[in-house]
Amino acid sequence: MLNELEITGRARTHVLQFHEPTRFAAQQEAGEAFLAMRAAAAKDGINVVPVSSFRDFQTQLRIWNYKFSGQRPLYDIHGVARDFGSLTPEQVIDCILNWSALPGGSRHQWGTEIDVVDGAAPALYEPMLLPQEVASGGIYERLHKWLDANIAKFGFFRPYEHYQGGMYPEPWHLSYAPLSTKVIGQVSADLLTEVIEASPVLGKDLLLPRIPEIFRNHILNFNRAPSA
C-alpha cells in the first residue's frame, strides 16, 4: 500500500534508483521484473531501454503547464501536431488528457510504469513516443513485436494498448500488474481534487469541476491486464 503522497507523486519513498541500462526509478519489485525482461530480450537481440519511469508530481505538473501554455506540442491520435492557436482552453485540456495525465493522477507516479524504446535505434535518433514509431515499418516495430509475445511472462501489460475513449494508445507504456492493479484502488477523485486545489496547475478553474469525469474517463478507463 502506498500513502497519499506516494500515490500522487509528491514523495518518492516507494521507489529505488536503478542504474542499468540507464538510470530509471521504480518500486523494487517492478524494477527487478523489468531487468529480468530486459535480459530475456537481450538473448533475442532486442535492447529494451527505459526512457520514462517514475515521474514525480512536479515533473507531471511541468509537462501539463507547458502543454496548456503552448510551450509543448499537442497531438491527435495519429501523432499529428494540433494547431494550438485554434483551440479553446477546454479543448486544450481535452488534447492534453489524450496523451498526458492530470498532475497527481499519473500512473508514472506509482513506480510501476516504464516507457520503453529500442536501444538499437540510431544513436542520434531522439525518441518521440508517437504511433508512427511502432507502426509497420517504424523504428521500434521489431521491439514491439517482441513485447507483444513476451511482456506478460514478466508481469507487465499495456494499460493504453487500445483506445477506448480515454488515453490514446501508448504501446510503449508498460505497467507492472502485480503492483499497479493494487494502487489503482487507492486513487480517488477526492484525493485528486485536494491535490489540484493546492497546486499551481494552469487551467485550475476549468479542471476542478471536471475531476470526477477525468477520474472516470482517464484514470479508471484503461485496458486491464489479461489476468485481471
Image (tube, grey):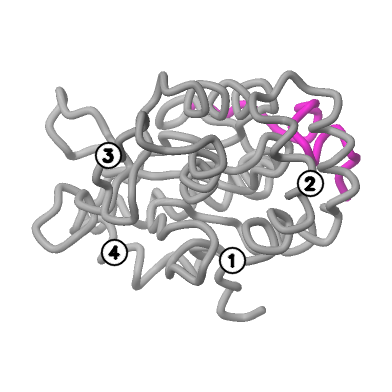
Across and down, in percent, residue 23 comes to: 49, 25
Q: Are marks 4 and 2 in contact (CB under 8 Å)?
A: no
Q: Nearer the viewer, mark 1 or mark 2?
A: 2
List the single residue furthest toward the bottom. 227
The residue carrying mark 1 is 222
Tag 1: Cα neighbours inside 10 Å, few (<14), some, or many (≥20)?
A: some
Amino acid beneath label 4: Trp
In-image side of 30 versus 68 (left or right): right
**Residue 228 is drawn in which quadrant?**
bottom right
Instruction: Indicate yes or no whether the magenta region holds residue 104.
Output: no
Secondary structure under badge 3? loop
Span colored in magenta: 1-19
In this view, the residue in front, 62 or 28, is 62
| Residue at the image point whose x is 14% and y is 53% from the top | 138
The residue carrying mark 3 is 81
The residue carrying mark 2 is 209
Amino acid beneath label 2: Pro
Across and down, in percent, residue 112 comes to: 64, 48
Secondary structure under badge 1? loop
Q: Nearer the viewer, mark 4 or mark 2?
A: 2
Secondary structure under badge 2? helix
